Amino acid sequence: MYQFKLEKQLNDFLQKEKNKRKKIGFVPTMGALHRGHISLIEKARAECDVVVCSIFVNPTQFNDPKDLEKYPRPIEQDIEMLLKADCTVLYLPDAEEIYPKGKPFLKKYDLGYYDKVLEAASRPGHFQGVANVVYRLLKKVKPEILYLGRKDFQQIQVIRKMIEIENISTQIDVCEIIREASGLAMSSRNVRLSESAWDNSALIFKTLFFLKENRNEFNSVKALRDEGIKRLGKISDSNIEYLEVCELETLQPIEIFIEKKHSIILVAIVVEGVRLIDNIILS
């Protein structure tokens, strides 16, 4: 596996590969890799000739400096996992490489509704940071396909919007959520949970799955939401930030289910001070 810290090194290598008509797949991460990330690498490996993974803990998407400080950075372990997954290139830029002119020169994207609700309401400025860093990484890597995990569903919609605004030709491949045996969605933040909180947090997916399987038993979307909130309330030392039922593409909240229209349940809950998100698609 090749490792590059500078854009010139990365570009020199990738240009040679592109001259050979090789297809580039890209998996952007903030490190602290787990099996969910590796599943993206494996999918990219199966579909592309060259797989680039970036590890960059992006400061512009953290509205809480303490959260940025606490973010795990086990780089040696990450490198070992990427080697085993047969990743082609690891791009390890620093903040000056990504933001040479500093934060005042960030772009301000018109992300519409995506930048006002759910995650955006809880984390002001977060998605502007996401859009800026992914734009800069895409300009450096220039991949044919960008691989993203569905756990961060609103983030995917934000990236789609940014790609549309910037007229970038990269396609997005949305990959399924990888879960622990209990059903808990894999996340780099999970390592901060105590053993009991880890076990209790399995109720998040169990609740989502119950709501999906029993959707027709509820006489309204409100009744479904209320049941979900009641079930999640059983997780000790937790605070529910939101549980919303939304139209799949726009993330507009819905009041009634419409046949043949896709919708999604999204949830964010803080357990022992650790913020966890998950979702499930309804059809």
Image (tube, rainbow, N blue to C red):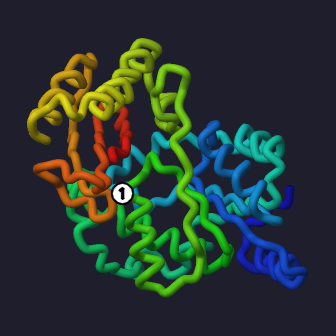
The structure residue drawn at horizontal position 39% and vertical position 81%, both measured from the top left corner, is: 107
- The answer to which of 117 and 127 lies nearer the viewer is 117
- The answer to which of 214 and 190 lies nearer the viewer is 214
Q: To which quarter of the image does residue 55 belong?
A: bottom right
Label 1 crowding class (10 Å Cα cut-off): few <14, some 14-19, many 20+?
many
SS of the residue at dot 1? helix
Please, what is the three-letter code of the amino acid marked with disc 1?
Gln
Residue 272 makes an appearance in the image: no
Q: To which quarter of the image does residue 204 belong?
A: top left
> Which residue of the protein is positioned furthest toward the front in this rendering?
259
- Left or right of 76, for residue 269: left
Image height of 218 relative to 86, above or below = above
The structure residue drawn at horizontal position 55% and vertical position 79%, both measured from the top left corner, is: 100
Q: Position of residue 190 (x, y in %)?
A: 48, 31
Residue 267 makes an appearance in the image: yes
Number of on-image labels: 1
Image height of 203 relative to 162, above or below = above
Q: Position of residue 25 (x, y in %)?
A: 70, 65
> Which residue of the protein is positioned furthest toward the top in this rendering?
196
Q: Position of residue 183 (x, y in %)?
A: 47, 26
- Left or right of 167, for residue 20: right
Q: Quadrant of the N terminus?
A: bottom right
- Left or right of 254, for residue 281: right
The structure residue drawn at horizontal position 29% and vertical position 79%, both measured from the top left corner, is: 110
Q: Which residue is mark 1?
A: 154
The structure residue drawn at horizontal position 40% and vertical position 59%, both measured from the top left corner, is: 155
Image height of 199 relative to 239, above or below = above
Q: Position of residue 51 (x, y in %)?
A: 76, 61
